[in-house]
Image (spheres, helix red, strand yellow):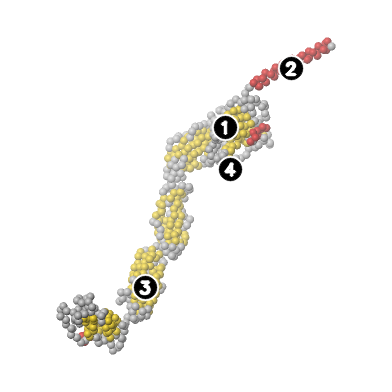
Amino acid sequence: MTGMLMLLTCVPCVADIKVPEGEGPRVEGFHKEVLRGADNRFMLSAVGKGLGIKLQYSIVEYPKHGKLELLNANTGEVSYRIDPNPNQNASAAQFLFRAKDVKGNFSSGAKGILVIIDRRAVVELPKKIDFGKVAMGSHKSRKLLIENKGDAAFKRKVKAPEGFQLNGRDEVELNIRAQGEVTLEVSFVAGEEAGKVQVDFVVQRENSLGKVALSSEVSPPFEVQAKLTLEFDGEDYSRNGELRIINPFNKKFMVKLMLPEGLESDDKNFEIDGESTKSVKLNIPSGNTGKFAGEVTISAGEFSEGVKIFAKACPARVVLTGIENNEMLFKEDLNKGNINKQLTLRNEGGVPANISANVNPPFRLLEGKDAKRLEPGKSFVYNIELKTDKFIRVEEELKIDYAGSPILVTLIGEVLRPPGMKIPGVVKPPVGHGHSSGAVEMVGGVPVRDILHGRTSVERLMNDSIPSVQKIRIIEQRSNSLVFSWIVQPGAAWEYIVEALVNLKDDKTGLPIPTWVEIKPEHLTITRSQSEIRAEIVGIVPGGEYTFRIFTVSPEGGCSFPAVLRLAIEHKQESFQWFRFWMLPLLGLVFCGAVSLVRRIRHERQLYG
């Protein structure tokens, strides 16, 4: 600057043209930087009075250094050029100009001072580069275009900001020719601390366009929710949920799960592809029914994140232990008095259950019908008593209620007595009509010759979903048959099988063996109506005890549990029996009289010839 001031003092001063106040336009002097060796162009301008009117510019005095040329007098456009020359080492030049209006009035002269600078490089970069989210421990790259808008080459070593790299290095050397450009690869290397990053990458400090703002955000390698509540599954009494782990980046990574006690997953170590989501199934098995709270730790490299897991306790779940098909059989071979059995209930849920039970006589709950509180994981025993003195077979339903679906248990009482023992409460049919068929060879009270034809018992597949025969009613005893009925059961088109209990002779021991034998269709007639099924067994004769059982049969061949009918058929003394009772002695008397008469005639013949 000292040289420039000395130069200005050496420039001869030209007296300004004086214009009386209020006359002519006004122009103002200025300072302008010009580049050595370049064609510098700029405009002369008016200020104050004269703005907006037509003016004509003129150069009053030209500079000593360089070449100044008025290109357009009407607009005031000028050009200035000073070539590099050792003899022209000036750092400044000045000139004098003025303007006149259309009336010919001139302005006062004004100075234009030109500051001469050498050629230089002028670097231009984008204002900002945003790398977006970058996963911890990974990197992301962007292209950076650097342009040299100056008239000199740009040569300099530049250093990358902390956390960034240039072409994979911390420092590079730039060599950009005038009006040239170069492209760098700028990479952001994410550290292990999450957060936003913003720095300036400076290439040319003295140039406001010579820097670019670099920004990014260090993020965990995955995204996951803060908490997860598992849902209850009523089918298997487990609690389940899906943990969703999102990888928003284009690089895949390995993940490891650490689970708290009580929580299970089949997927604990896995890989998540870039820009994808992994769903991990978590579950608490049915054996663990209480309230749950814990935390799953998800790790990827050095980063880990915790997800809180919650689950409500499972509802009460009362189950029966020690019985099959929800059925209990109370059975005795002799009438030994009451029969007692135990039914065990267990609460496999996670909250207490208030249970109550009810059953009809002749069954009785010794613990009573009052509600019982059954804690989770605990058991309770019902003692059930059956009185056996007034029935042969009985079936009742035990209903157990709690905070859930009721449980139904079928209680079956069956008392079998030895042959010849008097049977109380035997059903007796109405007196039959017609005549008895007479004595028939019997096996266990059943006419084998007419009904069974030697058929033996078979195993049957019983299903408690098939309704058993109920409300059997004896309708009529005919001369050689028995007619009885039962109510129609709702559901499928059921078929029926009737069996009789007989004593069959064992081929090896010769002893009778009680055996159930199916009655053949030609000796069994079944008719149907809307509300009743009627069966007639042909070949039944009076004077015996009979035991039958009836099965309901599904179209698939499954059978219900049997309904048992046990009865005694008595012999009635009808008119024919009365006639036979008195006729035999009478015939005997007649026969004796005839024999005596014949003997007497023979004797008389012998006496009298």
Q: Report how far apart the C-alphas of labels 2 and 1 lie in the structure.
A: 50 Å
Mark 3 nearby-residue class (10 Å; few <14, some 14–19, many ≥20): many
The amino acid sitting under disc 2 is Phe
User: Residue 556: which numbered mark, if any?
Assistant: 4
Q: Report the number of discs.
A: 4
- Residue at disc 1, secondary structure: strand
Q: Position of residue 161 (x, y in %)?
A: 35, 71
Q: Report how far apart the C-alphas of labels 1 and 4 lie in the structure.
A: 24 Å
Give the residue at the far right of this rendering. 609
- Considering the image in quadrants, where does the C terminus appear? top right
Mark 3 and mark 4 lie on one chain; the one further toward the N terminus is: 3
At x 59% / y 34%, what residue is drawn? 527
Q: Report how far apart the C-alphas of labels 2 and 4 lie in the structure.
A: 67 Å
Residue for badge 1:
485
At x 30% / y 88%, what residue is drawn? 86
Q: Where is residue 605 in the image (x, y as percent from the top left)?
A: 82, 12
Question: Is 231 in front, or is 99?
Answer: 99
